[in-house]
Image: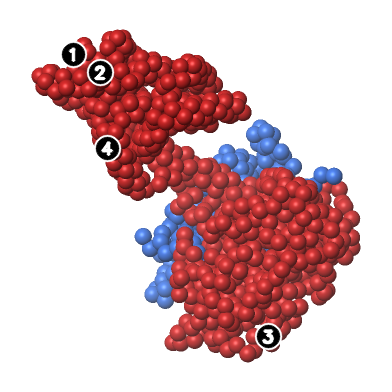
Chain colours: A red, B blue
């Protein structure tokens, strides 16, 4: 028994089940030469003409483009670009009826040709010397996608890493009427063979099988002659039967292999390319001629001159038909593609695209409209005709009954929608239409099921998390109680020295000012946050599942869901580095200037708070409220600034405050309803801030300030990001911070000597800020807690005002730093 | 300018259900002609009655079901049912027999199941069995074939007989049943069964003049005519070869085996193939698409099952001919057969049949 390969070499052919023999009506066009069409008035070039995603637009309206110039960029592997078919002006980029059965509008570039046919620069490749990568890139950049109908990007199939036994060139063209490939083979067999050579270089197959239907003797002879020098190229004439040009059917015909269900031909060592694609590859590589035109069979009895036309991509069908002497009939069908698998066009403005092989304008007598649909008589003529060996009558039954399980059992998914069944059905049942609907329903159902499953998983995860958090809270409360007792005992001794230091420093600085300002700032921020919390609550109520979560959590959750989250480990590493640096800077700056650290404390708080805002911004339900709140905050900040300007002696604080408010403004900008207003406000704020800075610089007393602040805030920023990834950790850290802050407060209260001022409050508010995130489970509680914290802080300030001592600054600063460290 | 939107394919081979049914009816013509020649013109009258009843009943039910009448009447499926029943019953059976039978076939068996394509049973055969059970006497009153008839029956006589049970000359149906030598003749199959039941050997039974009606004139020719019609249907690709070949082959093999084993107790295979409704069953009844199996392998099983049942009922059962029972029983098995003979879909591993 000879091996399969030997059999194939010997010219064996196999058969596939079913198939039909519709009248081919090819002679009308097959023997005529290919005519190039004159330039149409407008070209409509859809951005996406292949299976995959559209490329990035490279051109603008009003730009002049050259022939062959890329209009979109191939920015990923499933993208192939489109090119200008001729030189001219881009007069619009708009939506236009798509050359698709759905006829949904789709983006097109409209070009008005200037008639000059001016080419861009071309660099032909020598394919013998060019390497694989260059060739594949050229194929992709030339916009080549399967020209047989599906439009699968060619470079993907040509760049397979699997070993390929057989490269099958599909020149069967089994659909009635269509002779585009036939004409191409008659006219350019040598170029086609060069294209096949290039594919061979890329895929290195054992044999190349060129399948041509037996009713194209001239084409087959031409191809034979062109292949005569290549011994592993075999031209095979397959019997005339529809759909022998179907991918799976041709594979069966030529190799007796079947592509297993749900797999691709490449999995059994076979790659199939359309003959037109081979030609396009040769043109792209050897001439640097991208895919900007193709042969279209324009035929049907309503045309005076049915023929094969070399048409530019983007040519409207109407122009093409007119070119061939179209005489409209009432209630006319105009079909893009063949009579078996083509689709009717709703209007004739639809452009020719890369996959358009035929425009068919039949008369009523030629392809009469379908008669009334009768009942299925179970004659199983359809089953006899089905090339996939399905049982179309059963599929029909279950499609009507919407029995999706049965449809699956009867392998609806394997239906290639060839239409053979509907062609033979004596009851004229539009079987394919039923299958399309059923398939769409099944897809829809699967999507729903997936969604439901995800929602369920999320819900369960959330329940588990809430339970865990509850436990953690309980444990924490106990710990805190213990810690409080301890700290009260310890604090008594250590604070006296610090308090003395603070008093000295407080003489240099007007602590009251700072405290008030930062306090005001924080209040404003708090206002915003409350708004957000409320908005958030509303959102949570609306979205019944998933989100009784913190901003951070919801963000991280959404990040995970979107699958767009960057590697959290990397982020964590980066954050750690940032933190380390920040800490170093702090260490160096802290001893140097206390004031600076004091300034930086609110800055940190603010920036943290701001960060929170920025984080929450995308999830805000009601950006208008937030905007109002932000505006209030800005107003307050500005007032304070003015006060500060008048005093002209607290440049540092001013800086800090301004920077903070500037940040706040800048950060909040994206969430504003009216970004222009926000921008104006931000610009004003910036201008003021700059003035103050200048003043401050003139005073020359706080160069380092900005550094420290910058470091701290950058840290905060860096910090925040990774901590989103693990909201639970953040929650723990925040809780620790709270605990510490409380400790300090207690210490301060006990001593009654100091301001604790900004810092106490800063800590408190930073606590609250940190708090807010994890505790947003119940924003109302958080708000109450925050209010309490504020009240306490204010009391302390009042005390501090008189004494104006601030030795706790350092402590607080250290605590903050630790908080940040912890929260990592 | 509006363009017609249609879903693919836009091509159709223009072979409609109506034309298929029409072809089936046309293919019956040779058989009907031979039957008329050998058994009198009664069959033609029955045909007219049956078709009229079928159309009426169909139209009535369709209007009750609020369905468009014209396209469904024009699918000719009712016509085929009527024809099949008309040729199956005795040509001179009283008029009400065929009317009841046809109405039953159309209303009960076909429309109540949901109309064309939804009926589990072959309507003509279900009606035949119903009639046979309800009116056994009328359903077995076959006249002897022409050469053996004692009374010549004109077309007018046929009409008179069917409507009044007396010919214009005043002969009663039982008188007409008498053959030239004064014996009441049933069909050869009937005779054979009775004789064998009475303990006669086949060779003895073979002496009866009834068998003249087999080879000499009647049933052989009728069957040959239906065979010709069946071959025409095959050639027209209205039916596929599987069911008729399976029916005939299994009947042939089984009768051959038993005949070889005991030639005295069992009739020859040829006798079985060409008597009664064998050919009609194989080509026209078993191939009724609606009630037959729809898979290729299933059709072979289905046909073979009918052959087996015909053999069993003819050889061991109590009814003169077995075709109707065999077909109905096989109809019942169709869902099962279909399920287990699903073809292997392209790209899938074999399954189903071998389970
Ligand atoms: S061809 Fe049409 S009528 Fe016949 S079984 Fe298939 S669907 Fe039913
Ligand atoms: S359309 Fe589907 S079911 Fe119909 S013949 Fe083609 S593959 Fe078979």
Q: Position of residue A74 (x, y in %)?
A: 59, 58
Q: Residue at x 89, y 63 (%)?
A: A304
Q: What crowding class fits label 3: few (fewer than 14 Cα within 10 Å), some (14-19), or many (20 or more)? A: some
Q: Is residue A484 above or below residue A424?
A: above
Q: Residue at x 82, y 68 (%)?
A: A36
Q: CA distance from mark 4 to mark 3?
A: 80 Å
Q: Earlier in the sequence, mark 1 or mark 4?
A: 4
The chain carrying label 1 is A
Q: Earlier in the sequence, mark 3 or mark 2?
A: 3
Q: CA distance from mark 3 to mark 2?
A: 99 Å
Q: Mark 3 or 2, which is nearer the eye?
A: 2
Q: Position of residue B264 (x, y in %)?
A: 42, 72
Q: CA distance from mark 4 to mark 2?
A: 22 Å
Residue A751's label in the rendered image is: 1
The chain carrying label 3 is A
Mark 1 falls on what kind of element? helix
Q: Residue at x 43, y 67 (%)?
A: B200
Q: Which sits in the foreground, A473 or B80?
A: A473
Q: CA distance from mark 1 to mark 3?
A: 101 Å
| Residue at mark 2 | A503
| Residue at mark 4 | A587
Seen in the image, is A462 located left or right of residue A490?
right
Q: CB atoms at circles 4 and 3 under 8 Å apart?
A: no
Q: Earlier in the sequence, mark 4 or mark 2?
A: 2
Residue A226's label in the rendered image is: 3
């Amino acid at each position: 028994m000879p091996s399969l390969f030997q059999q194939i070499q010997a010219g064996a052919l196999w058969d596939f089940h079913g198939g039909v023999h519709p009248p081919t009506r090819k002679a009308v066009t097959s023997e005529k030469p290919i005519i190039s069409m004159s330039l149409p008035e407008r070209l409509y070039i859809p951005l996406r003409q292949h299976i995959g995603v559209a490329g990035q637009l490279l051109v603008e309206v009003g730009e002049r483009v050259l022939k062959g110039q890329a209009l979109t960029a191939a920015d990923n592997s499933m993208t192939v670009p489109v090119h200008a078919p001729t030189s001219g002006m881009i007069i619009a980029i708009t939506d236009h009826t798509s050359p698709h059965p759905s006829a949904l509008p789709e983006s097109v570039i409209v070009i008005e040709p200037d008639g000059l046919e001016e080419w861009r620069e071309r660099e032909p490749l020598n394919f013998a010397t060019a390497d694989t990568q260059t060739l594949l890139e050229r194929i992709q950049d030339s916009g080549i996608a399967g020209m047989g109908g599906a439009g699968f990007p060619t470079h993907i199939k040509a760049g397979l890493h699997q070993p390929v036994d057989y490269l099958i060139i599909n020149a069967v063209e089994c659909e009635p009427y269509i002779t585009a490939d036939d004409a191409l083979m008659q006219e350019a067999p040598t170029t086609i063979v060069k294209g096949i050579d290039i594919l061979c270089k890329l895929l290195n197959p054992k044999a190349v099988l060129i399948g041509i239907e037996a009713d194209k003797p001239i084409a087959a002879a031409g191809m034979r002659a062109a292949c005569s020098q290549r011994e592993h190229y075999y031209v095979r004439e397959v019997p005339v039967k529809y759909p022998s040009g179907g991918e799976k059917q041709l594979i069966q015909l030529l190799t007796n292999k079947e592509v297993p269900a749900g797999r691709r031909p490449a999995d059994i060592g076979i790659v199939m390319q359309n003959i037109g694609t081979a030609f396009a590859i040769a043109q792209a590589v050897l001439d640097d001629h991208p895919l900007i035109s193709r042969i279209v069979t324009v035929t049907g009895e309503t045309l005076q001159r049915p023929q094969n036309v070399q048409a530019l991509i983007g040519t409207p069908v109407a122009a093409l038909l007119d070119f061939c002497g179209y005489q409209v009939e009432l209630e006319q069908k105009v079909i893009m593609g063949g009579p078996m698998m083509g689709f009717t066009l709703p209007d004739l403005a639809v452009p020719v695209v890369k996959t358009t092989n035929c425009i068919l304008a039949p008369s009523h007598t030629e392809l009469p409209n379908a008669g009334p649909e009768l009942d299925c008589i179970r004659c199983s003529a359809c089953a006899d005709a089905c090339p996939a060996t399905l049982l179309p009558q059963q599929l029909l039954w279950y499609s009507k009954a919407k029995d999706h399980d049965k449809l699956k059992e009867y392998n609806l998914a394997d239906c290639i929608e060839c239409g053979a069944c509907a062609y033979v059905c004596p009851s004229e049942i539009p079987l394919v239409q039923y299958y399309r609907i059923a398939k769409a329903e099944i897809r829809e159902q699967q999507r729903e099921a997936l969604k439901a499953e995800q929602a369920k998983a999320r819900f369960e995860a959330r329940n588990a998390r809430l339970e865990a958090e509850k436990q953690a809270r309980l444990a924490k409360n106990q710990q805190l109680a213990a810690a409080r007792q301890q700290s009260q005992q310890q604090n008594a001794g250590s604070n006296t020295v610090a308090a003395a230091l603070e008093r000295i420093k407080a003489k240099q600085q007007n602590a009251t000012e700072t405290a008030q300002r930062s306090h005001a700032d924080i209040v404003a921020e708090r206002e915003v946050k409350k708004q957000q919390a409320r908005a958030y609550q509303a959102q949570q109520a609306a979205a019944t599942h998933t989100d009784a979560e913190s901003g951070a959590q919801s963000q991280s959750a959404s990040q995970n869901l979107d699958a767009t989250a960057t590697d959290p480990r990397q982020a964590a590493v980066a954050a750690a580095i940032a933190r380390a640096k920040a800490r170093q800077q702090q260490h160096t700056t802290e001893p140097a200037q206390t004031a600076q650290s004091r300034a930086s404390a609110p800055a940190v708080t603010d920036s943290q708070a701001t960060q929170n805002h920025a984080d929450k911004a995308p999830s805000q339900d009601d950006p208008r409220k937030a905007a109002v709140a932000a505006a209030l905050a800005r107003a307050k900040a500005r007032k304070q600034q003015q006060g500060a300007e008048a005093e002209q002696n607290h440049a540092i604080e001013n800086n800090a405050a301004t920077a903070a408010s500037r940040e706040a403004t800048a950060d909040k900008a994206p969430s504003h309803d009216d970004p222009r207003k926000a921008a104006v406000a931000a610009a004003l704020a910036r201008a003021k801030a700059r003035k103050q800075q200048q003043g401050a610089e003139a005073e020359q007393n706080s160069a380092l300030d900005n550094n420290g602040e910058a470091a701290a805030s950058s840290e905060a920023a860096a910090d925040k990001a990774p901590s989103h990834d693990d909201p639970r950790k953040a929650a723990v850290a925040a809780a620790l911070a709270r605990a510490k802050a409380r400790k300090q407060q207690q210490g301060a209260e006990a001593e009654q000597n100091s301001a604790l001022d900004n810092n106490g409050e800063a800590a408190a508010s930073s606590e609250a800020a940190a708090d807010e995130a994890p505790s947003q489970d119940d924003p109302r509680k958080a708000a109450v807690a925050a209010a309490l914290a504020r009240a306490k802080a204010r009391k302390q300030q009042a005390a501090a005002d008189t004494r104006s001592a601030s030795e706790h600054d350092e402590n607080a600063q250290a605590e903050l730093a630790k908080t940040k460290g912890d929260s990592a | 300018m509006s363009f017609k939107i249609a879903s693919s394919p836009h091509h159709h081979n223009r072979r409609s259900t109506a034309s298929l049914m029409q072809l089936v009816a046309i293919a019956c013509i040779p058989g009907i002609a031979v039957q008329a020649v050998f058994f009198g013109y009664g069959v033609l009258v029955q045909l007219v009655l049956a078709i009229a009843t079928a159309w009426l009943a169909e139209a009535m039910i369709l209007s009750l079901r609020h369905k468009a009448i014209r396209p469904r009447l024009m699918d000719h499926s009712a016509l085929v049912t009527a024809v099949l029943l008309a040729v199956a019953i005795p040509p001179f059976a009283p008029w009400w027999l065929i009317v009841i039978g046809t109405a039953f076939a159309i209303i009960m068996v076909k429309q109540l199941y949901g109309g064309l394509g939804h009926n589990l049973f072959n309507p003509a055969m279900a009606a035949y069995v119903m009639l046979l059970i309800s009116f056994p006497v009328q359903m077995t009153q076959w006249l002897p074939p022409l050469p053996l008839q004692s009374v010549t029956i004109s077309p007018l006589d046929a009409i008179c007989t069917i409507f009044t049970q007396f010919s214009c000359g005043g002969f009663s149906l039982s008188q007409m049943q008498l053959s030239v030598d004064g014996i009441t003749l049933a069909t050869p199959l009937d005779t054979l069964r009775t004789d064998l039941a009475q303990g006669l050997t086949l060779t003895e039974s073979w002496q009866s003049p009834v068998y003249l009606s087999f080879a000499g004139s009647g049933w052989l020719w009728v069957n040959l005519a239906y065979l010709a019609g069946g071959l025409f249907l095959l050639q027209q690709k209205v039916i596929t070869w599987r069911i008729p070949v399976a029916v005939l082959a299994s009947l042939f093999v089984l009768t051959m085996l038993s005949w070889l084993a005991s030639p005295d107790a069992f009739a020859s295979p040829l006798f079985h193939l060409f008597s009664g409704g064998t050919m009609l069953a194989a080509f026209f009844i078993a191939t009724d698409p609606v009630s037959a199996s729809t898979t290729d392998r299933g059709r072979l099983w289905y046909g073979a099952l009918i052959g087996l049942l015909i053999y069993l009922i003819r050889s061991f059962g109590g009814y003169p001919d077995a075709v109707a029972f065999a077909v109905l029983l096989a109809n019942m098995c169709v869902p099962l057969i279909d399920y287990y003979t699903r073809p292997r879909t392209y790209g899938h591993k074999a399954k189903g049949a071998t389970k």
